Image (tube, helix red, strand yellow):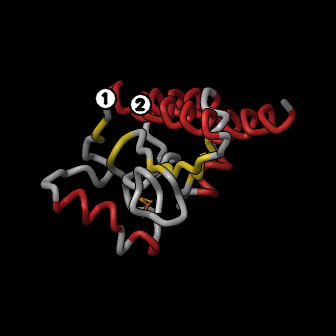
Amino acid sequence: MGKNSKIEWTHHTFNPWWGCTRVSAACVHCYAETWSKRLGKKLWGPKAPRRFLSDAYWMEPIKWNREAKQQGLRARVFCASMADVFEARSDLNGSRERLWKLIEETPQLDWLLLTKRPETDIEDGSMVSDLAQKCLDRNNG
Ligand code: SF4
């Protein structure tokens, strides 16, 4: 089990925001939506707002990266358990760009990005190409 996550296959979880919109039958039993509702938050659907996290929260991966480096380890980060990082909404673009930058700044971390929007994202090159380029740069660096 991870240090900052109850999920066995990752060390940490990170959410650039909370909230999403269902896109397929695979979303019917969305754990994140259920959990969010349980906490009294209305963050699902195209018209619902998203919940954005504090600057202090965004600093956590920097700390994880430093710790992993000190220990000579790589650490896995599950991103995102409460959202889909490729959801196409203009109000998410700033946080998405911030996430790509954060990934770039944390080379000791293996970021696991899960999405249910792979086709949509391929069509929207602006969302995928940035990330793909950063991964290629890292692998070639
Ligand atoms: S894409 Fe993921 S987070 Fe979004 S509604 Fe579907 S299962 Fe939930």
Q: Residue at x 43, y 33 (%)?
A: 60
Find disc 2 in the rendering and name its residue. 58
Q: Nearer the viewer, residue 90 or 34?
A: 34
Report whether 83 appears left or right of 48: right
Q: Residues within 10 Å of mark 1 (few under 14, many from 20)?
A: few
Tell me the quadrant of the picture where the C terminus can be found: top right
Q: Quadrant of residue 117?
A: bottom right
Image x and y of residue 134, in percent: 72, 33
Q: Secondary structure at mark 2?
A: helix
Dot 1: element? loop
* Ligand 1 has an atom within 8 Å of the beta carbon of the residue at disc 2: no
Report the disc number at residue 87: none
Q: How many angstroms separate mark 1 from mark 2 (CA)?
A: 7 Å
Mark 2 belongs to which amino acid?
Trp
Q: Residue at x 29, y 61 (%)?
A: 33
Quickly name the residue at label 1: 54
At 13% from the left and 54% from the top, the residue drawn is: 40
Left or right, residue 117 beside residue 17: right
Q: Where does ligand 1 appear, by image quarter?
A: bottom left
| Residue furthest to the front | 71
The answer to whether marks 1 and 2 mark residues whose Cβ atoms lie closer than 8 Å is yes
Q: Is residue 105 above or below residue 22?
A: above
In the picture as drawn, the residue positioned furthest to the left comes out as 40
Q: Residue at x 45, y 31 (%)?
A: 95
Left or right of residue 11: residue 108 = right
Amino acid at dot 1: Ser
* Residue 130 coordinates in the image, percent (x, y): 68, 33
The image shows residue 5 at horizontal and vertical percentages of 41, 56
Q: Nearer the viewer, residue 93 or 133?
A: 133
| Residue 54 location (% of width, % of height) | 31, 29
